[in-house]
Image (tube, helix red, strand yellow):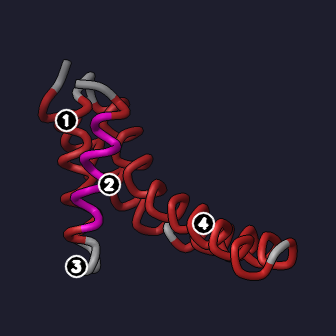
């Protein structure tokens, strides 16, 4: 389908299975790699994007709510909290990258 579709489907699977410590991101990346197609490299990119997308969305929501309730100070707090969310999501993103690499390799070009 495409890289964006694979990342979006992988993100949705990550929301559902994210509570499973290792296998949740691995399965989400695998599904993202299968949907993205295009070989192992494209599958790995889709898996990584699906893993990092959650931290990015949390960062955007926290920043928006911080501005809405606290004004300019809330924007600074939201940006800081969003940065921390993205950094913490890197572990799951790397595991999803491995799953995407596997899924993309299985699907092939």
The mark closer to the camera, 2 or 3, is 2
For label 2, the crowd category at 10 Å Cα-Cα, with few meaning under 14, some 14 to 19 and many 20 or more, is many
Residue assigned mark 2: 11
Distance in Å between CA atoms under marks 4 and 1:
26 Å
The residue shown at (18%, 47%) is: 31
Residue assigned mark 3: 20
The residue shown at (20%, 18%) is: 109
Judge left or right: residue 52 versus residue 64.
Answer: left
Judge left or right: residue 106 versus residue 80.
Answer: left
The mark closer to the camera, 4 or 1, is 4
Distance in Å between CA atoms under marks 4 and 3:
22 Å
Going from N to C along the chain, the mark reached first, 2 or 3, is: 2
Callouts 3 and 1 close, C-beta under 8 Å: no
| Vertical side of 28 occupied by 24: above or below | below
Q: Nearer the viewer, residue 9 or 46?
A: 9
| Vertical side of 30 occupied by 92: above or below | below
Q: Secondary structure at mark 4?
A: helix
Going from N to C along the chain, the mark reached first, 2 or 4, is: 2
The residue shown at (86%, 72%) is: 72
Res. 69 image quadrant: bottom right
What are the residue bounds of the magenta stretch? 5-15
Magenta span contains residue 7 = yes
Q: Secondary structure at mark 2?
A: helix
Residue 19 placement (x, y as % from top left): 26, 80
The residue shown at (26%, 31%) is: 36
Residue assigned mark 1: 35
Distance in Å between CA atoms under marks 2 and 4:
15 Å
């Amino acid at each position: 389908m495409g890289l964006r579709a694979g990342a979006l489907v992988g993100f949705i699977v990550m929301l559902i299975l994210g509570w499973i410590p290792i296998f949740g991101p691995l399965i989400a990346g695998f599904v993202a790699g299968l949907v993205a197609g295009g070989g192992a490299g494209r599958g790995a990119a889709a898996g990584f994007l699906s893993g990092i997308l959650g931290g990015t969305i949390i960062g955007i929501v926290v920043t928006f709510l911080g501005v809405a309730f606290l004004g300019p100070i809330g924007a600074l707090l939201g940006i800081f909290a969003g940065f921390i969310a993205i950094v913490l999501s890197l572990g799951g993103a790397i595991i999803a990258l491995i799953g995407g690499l596997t899924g993309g390799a299985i699907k092939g070009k």
